[in-house]
Amino acid sequence: MSAIPPAFGPTEPIPCDDDRDAFATVNISMVVSREQLRAALAIGHAEQAGQPPLADLEVLDVRREVEGYLAAVAIISTEQETATARISPELLAELDAAIDRAYTRRQFIHEAQAPSYSEGTVTLQTLDRGEVTVPEPAWCKGHEGELVGPLSQVTHDGSDITADVDGLPLVRANLTHAPYLELEPEPHPLVYVEGLEAASFDADGLRQVVAEGRAFLDRLEALAGQLDALAEEGSS
Ligand SMILES: [Zn+2]
């Protein structure tokens, strides 16, 4: 296979059979040929007794048909294999251990943090390490309401500073530190700067932009000083 072709979907999660308890949503991307698409659509559509006619299907319905057929085939053959396979209790325990490692702590997925703070630390839930207690910088605005994720995604964010003109937030910035990132580690806090709304201004408006911009730059400059101080604290 040369290049990976464009991706479409998944349109929506396909529920498992009603007799089973839903445990995890497994997302896979399948690269298929036009012939395979055609076959999946033809069989899926035939199973719906050809109704509504293909020409009347919305784009998303066509994709649902294809995804539903591919998923059904995979699940049905998995069930057939399971019905005939003999699995020893030892193997069963090993399988469950591997599943618990790979599909863990689902009770926290999509759950919000309920952080508890104590002398310069915060205790948070993580998907990969369970409960962790990490240093909480004084400038962090807290972790209430954040979604539980892996430790690497734990990020401390300071309060926003913005340049607002006529209530339009043009630029915003905040102190930030993700100390546990694996790919691009952040040994010291950084300042995240984001440009926001676009707008056109007349001369007076533009003067306001300049005034706000100057004040914003002054505050950014102060943050640069704060970054120096924090880096020094962190490495001492
Ligand atoms: Zn924090």
Image: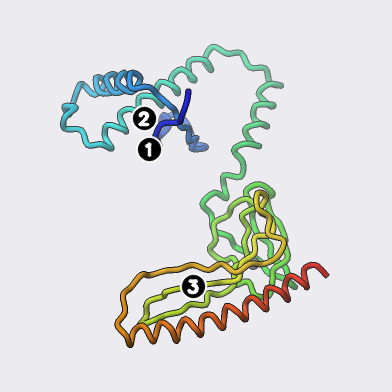
Q: What residue type is labelled 2?
A: Glu
Nearer to us in this view, 40 or 96: 40
Q: How crowded is mark 3: few (under 14 residues within 10 Å), some or many (20 or more)?
A: some
Residue corresponding to mark 3 = 172
Disc 2, SS: helix
Q: How crowded is mark 2: few (under 14 residues within 10 Å), some or many (20 or more)?
A: many
Residue 185 shows up from this direction: yes
Residue 142 shows up from this direction: no
Residue corresponding to mark 2 = 67
Residue corresponding to mark 1 = 9
- Total numbered labels: 3
Q: Do the residues labelled 3 and 1 touch (CB within 8 Å)?
A: no
Q: Which of marks 3 and 1 is nearer the N terminus?
A: 1
Q: Are marks 2 and 1 in contact (CB under 8 Å)?
A: yes
Q: Which amino acid does label 1 sit on?
A: Gly
How far is mark 3 from mark 2, CA to CA?
41 Å
Is residue 105 depicted above or below 157 in this figure? above
Residue 65 image position (x, y, % from top left): 30, 29
Is residue 230 depicted above or below 108 in this figure? below
